[in-house]
Amino acid sequence: MPRRTATMLASTLILIALLCAGVFIKVPYSEMSPGPTVNTLGDHDGEPVLQISGHKTYPTTGHLNMTTVRVTSADYNMNLVEAVYGWLAHDNKVVPHDTLYPDGKTEQQSTQENAEEFSQSQESAKVAALKELGVPVKSWVIVSTVVKDSPAEGRLHAGDVIKSVDGTAVKAPDDVAKLVTKHKPGEKVVFTVVPAKEQATAEKAGKTATATTDVTITTAKSSDSGASRAIVGISAGTDHTFPFSIDIKLADVGGPSAGLMFALGIVDKLTPGNLTGGKFVAGTGTIDDNGTVGPIGGIELKTIGAREKGAQYFLTPKDNCAAAAKDTPQGLTLVKVNTIDDAMNALKDISSGKTADLPKCTAKG
């Protein structure tokens, strides 16, 4: 056999062997890629994404698309070949597995956490939208979750309304932790609550629950390394009563990053005219009850997915601007927003064609 042929054959065999080995070598990485993008003003799976009843709504045109990222599952074992391909592919991103699933989080745990964040983002979007329109919303602090095997287990329940702690009125979720941590581990703390069942009954009847119960709990020491603060084992959140029905119908989506686009969609539905002027606007960002927009993960992939679907403008959280601007898809304008007011002003400029006035993202933010 000629030497050149033998060398080529040997090289081919070595390459095949390396590829085979790469298929069987597992690496601790996961992959992210652009996911679906859905118009909050339109339909999804045959029904409107935003369903509002009990209040006048108005026709809308254009797009206010929320964007998503696909990720490999927690139990997916990526091989070396897939990791290398993902690193080289422009539309994919390979990240350490622990980035997406920290502390050995299972697929079920991750799905549950994402579902809870998605639900909370919907509530905050409704509140932010109605506040933007000057519509009053009743709010109160509740027990959001109770940690298993904690002092609060069996004593407090998810949905209980927290009126006060040690006689001090609670006005925000952060107040609860501040009041509990005034104690030392082993001391007693008194929660005055409206039980979740009584609250639910009152809401169905359109009334305000007034009967309260005092619950005394002995605090424990935090399990955080080096910490000696007192805890009872709950997380506090906020619940609301809305003056009319707003339902967000979107299955198989998780996480908090659609909050901004949901809020804008609600505002558009409840006001005459069109926020977008018929333009294709996409975006992302968490939102809190006060309308502040927060950063999200996978911004580069979301801009790619949005542009592939036809988006012309992308509402980008301020803290994501620098990363997004490093590789902006051609034909997509990144618009910097920090609040729902920023987004509303940007949409006004987009609708009127005054795009030169838009606050655009740059590599510096």
Image: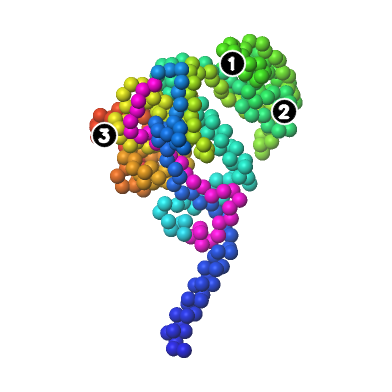
Residue 355 marker: 3
> Where residue 342 sits in the image (x, y, percent)?
36, 28
Residue bearing the label numbered 2: 153
Question: How dense is the environment of label 2, judged by Cα within 10 Å: few (below 14), some, or many (20 and up)?
Answer: some
Question: How dense is the environment of label 3, judged by Cα within 10 Å: few (below 14), some, or many (20 and up)?
Answer: some
Q: Which residues are magenta?
A: 57-84
> Contact (CB < 8 A) between labels 1 and 2?
no
Nearest to N terminus: mark 3 or mark 2: 2
Which residue is depicted at the point 52% across and 68% down?
A: 19
Comparing 48 with 222, the one in front is 48
Task: Give the quadrant of residue 278.
Answer: top left
Q: Quadrant of the C terminus?
A: top left
- Disc 3 on helix, strand or loop? helix
Nearest to N terminus: mark 3 or mark 1: 1
The Cα–Cα distance between marks 3 and 1, rounded to whole angstroms, is 46 Å
Residue bearing the label numbered 1: 203
Task: Give the quadrant of residue 219.
Answer: top right
